[in-house]
Each structure stands twice: as C-alpha cells, then as structure tokens.
Amino acid sequence: MGVSITRRLDALKDADKADYRKKYYIFRYRLNGKDARTERDAKLFEWVANKKKLTQSQREHNKEAEFVAQQRLQDEKARIYRNEYDVDITKQKYIGFEEYFNEYIRLHSPKIEKSSVNSYYSARDWFVKWSKKPKGLHEINRKAAMEFQAYITNDALSKFGKPLAESSIKSYLNRIKLVLNEAVDEGYIRSNPFKDLDVAIKIKRKKREYVTLEEYTLLDEELCRNPNVARAFKFGFLTGLRSGDIEKLKWKDLVKDEKGWHVFTEQEKTGELIRIAINNQSMELLGRRRMDEMPLIPYTYNGNSNNILYEWLRMCGITKPLGQSKGGITFHTSRASFITNHLNNNTPPVVVMQLAGHTHLKTTMDYYRDYNIDRDKWAKEYETYVNNASATKKLLETS
C-alpha cells in the first residue's frame, strides 16, 4: 500500500463570480497501482485567488495547511511501513522490476531529456544483468540494493572493458531510487530499499582543457573546411551558449534595445528563458543581417562536427589535447572557456552563474577549468546571493 497527496479545486456553481476558491487536500491510498480509497478533510484546504489577491492571513493559512498536510502524509507513510493497515505484501499483485521500470520510462520519457531517458535504460539494464534472473519489485530489499551498488562500483565493466565512471554509477543508483519511489506511492512496495543509500561517490576531478583568450586570437574561421562550424564554436566562446542553443537561433532572435544587441533564447537543457548580450566581436562574426527566419549560424551539430573542429584547431596552431576521453577540447569547451576566462578575469562568480544561465553556483564551478580555486570564497558569495534573493522575494510578496 502507498499514500500520496493531491489537491482538488472545489466545484462552485458560480465559480467565475467568487473572489476566492478552495483547493482541498486529498489523501490517496493505493494498492497494486490502483486507488484503494481517498480521504478528504474538510478543514484541510488552501485558498486560491480567483477575482481578488489573497490576503496576508490567507497566505499564512496556506503555509500552515501545507505543513499539516505534509506532516500527516509522513505519519501515514510511517503507519503503512509498520503495517498498521494489515496489508500482506506477499498477497499483492506481482509485478516485475523490469516490467515496472519500462512502464515508468514510457510514462515519463515525454517530460525528460533524451540523455536522461538513456540513463534510465542503462540503469535498468545493469540491474537486470546483475540480478541474472527476473525479480519482482517486492523481492528487492536493502541487502539487494547494497549488493547491486557494490557490483556496479567494483565489478561492472563497460563495453570497452573499463570500470564504470563514478558519475555514471551515481546516476544509475539515483534513477533506480526515483523509479522505486513511485512504486511506493503506487502501493506496489511498502518502502524504497534504495532510499538513503549512500550514492555520494566521490568523483575525481581530472584536468580538462579550455581555450584561453590568447589562443582565441589564433582562431581563423576561414581556415576551416566548414566555416560555420568554426563560427558556432567562436560564438559559444564569446556568449557562453551551448551548441544546441546556438543551432536553433534565428536572425529574428537578435534584437537591439537601449542596452545594445542581444538574443532572448530558451535554453534547450533547462527550458529557461535567458537574455544574452551580443558584443561587437560577436556581431562581426555573424556578418550581414539576413531574413528573420534564417538561422543565425547555419550549421547542424552532428557526429562529424568534432572531427571538423579538431582539424581546424590544429591548423590554427592549437596544440592542446583534443577529445573528451583525453580531457581535451571538444565543441562544449567553448562554453567552459567562456566561464573560465570570465572567472580568471575577476568577474564575480554569481554574475558568471547568471551569464551562463545556471541556477546553482556548483554547476558553474564544475565548468571551471583552472584548479587554483578558492571554493570557500565562492560558497560564501553564493550564500550571500541566495540570502539577498530570498529577502527580495519576501519584499515583493508583502508589497
């Protein structure tokens, strides 16, 4: 059995005329993936603005209701875990791990990136390979979770005969944990054996290359057999945009206001809308303006793009290692170089974080390619930034 919370808007006859409406908390108890029963507490609801803004007391009520609802949810989960509802897990409907995992991927794949979907498939395949024979969800206990973790950490080998990357191991364990969390909510299992499993595997930072400002001056796109590939790399170096975001830009996205030229673009990876300033160097790189629907840089990133890039970099006199396996320069290095060069020139880390379109400073730090870094100073600066942002948000809410 599992339990979860949903909220349901009240059904008023003249809802469009009401100043405020109520959303009631609904507790859903599920067994074998189906609703066993639902409960609604008439006193447990949140106010929803309809024709008027919520008052201060209504906002405070909503916070208290959320706290009470979450507390009750945890209490109910504890009761289910202690089997106070007298549900015999062995009598529940059998469902196999692989079957449930496939259904989870099918339902969630439209909402997640392709690379993440592939990671889910890999996590499933490694677990199936380890288990050797099909396992039902209810057969996966804490001991099995720990044994699987030991297997992919110490024994599993990639198709190249090498141990799995520590980042991959961490990703696979987290994917399985997410799937089993849903199995708990669906009522297939009482608890998640992968919950609180230590997946904080220490990842060794290996040296990765970047393009310095001095090296950038050597880059002549006219030497490249596909100049647009070179322009895309240089544009990423100057703006910090990802190759996928550059590829989808059109001339209509390039606009000018009192602050100068810029593009507004929705990040392919995060879906967030960001404003990117376009300096004179970038404008010269783009050349004369074309029709609005034409691509800003007409190129398509594919399997051959890095090969063209490597050939061009060597022709321009760049002698650093090339290719991801060597920690060398790749197409994505243009973005990392943008971040690293800004930081090396004393641009405040929080400003760089915003320029790169990141929401967490840790992400920006991971892009940094020099290693004489004062992480304590960065952490303190980010804490100040978060505190200031929180204070500003509260001020706006009360104004």
Image: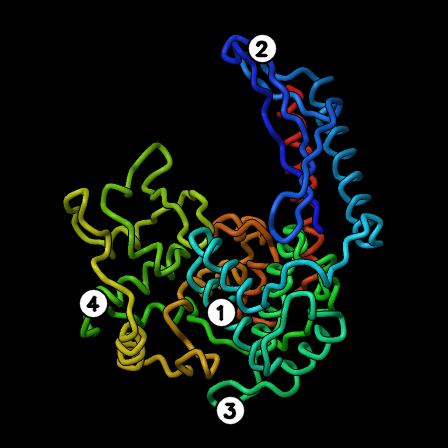
Alpha-carbon distance for marks 2 and 1?
48 Å
Q: In the image shown, does 246 or 33 lie closer to the viewer?
A: 33
Which of disc 2 and disc 3 is earlier in sequence?
2
Write the residue at 77% across / 58% down.
88
Residue with the mark numbered 1: 121
The residue mark sitting in front, 4 or 2, is 2
Alpha-carbon distance for marks 4 and 2?
60 Å
Which of disc 4 and disc 1 is earlier in sequence?
1
Classed neighbour count for the residue bearing mark 1: other residues with Cα under 10 Å, few (<14), some (14–19), many (≥20) = some
Residue 161's disc is 3
Classed neighbour count for the residue bearing mark 3: other residues with Cα under 10 Å, few (<14), some (14–19), many (≥20) = few
Q: What kind of residue is marked 2?
A: Asp
Cβ atoms under marks 2 and 1 closer than 8 Å: no
Which of disc 2 and disc 4 is earlier in sequence?
2
Say what secondary structure mark 1 lies in: helix
Write the residue at 45% across / 56% down.
109
Say what secondary structure mark 2 lies in: loop
Classed neighbour count for the residue bearing mark 2: other residues with Cα under 10 Å, few (<14), some (14–19), many (≥20) = few
Residue with the mark numbered 2: 19
Cβ atoms under marks 1 and 4 closer than 8 Å: no
Alpha-carbon distance for marks 1 and 4?
37 Å
Q: Position of residue 330 (x, y in %)?
A: 39, 73
Residue 190 appears in which quarter of the rendering?
bottom right
Alpha-carbon distance for marks 1 and 3?
20 Å
Residue 123 appears in which quarter of the rendering?
bottom right
The residue mark sitting in front, 2 or 1, is 1
Which of disc 3 and disc 1 is earlier in sequence?
1
Residue with the mark numbered 4: 227
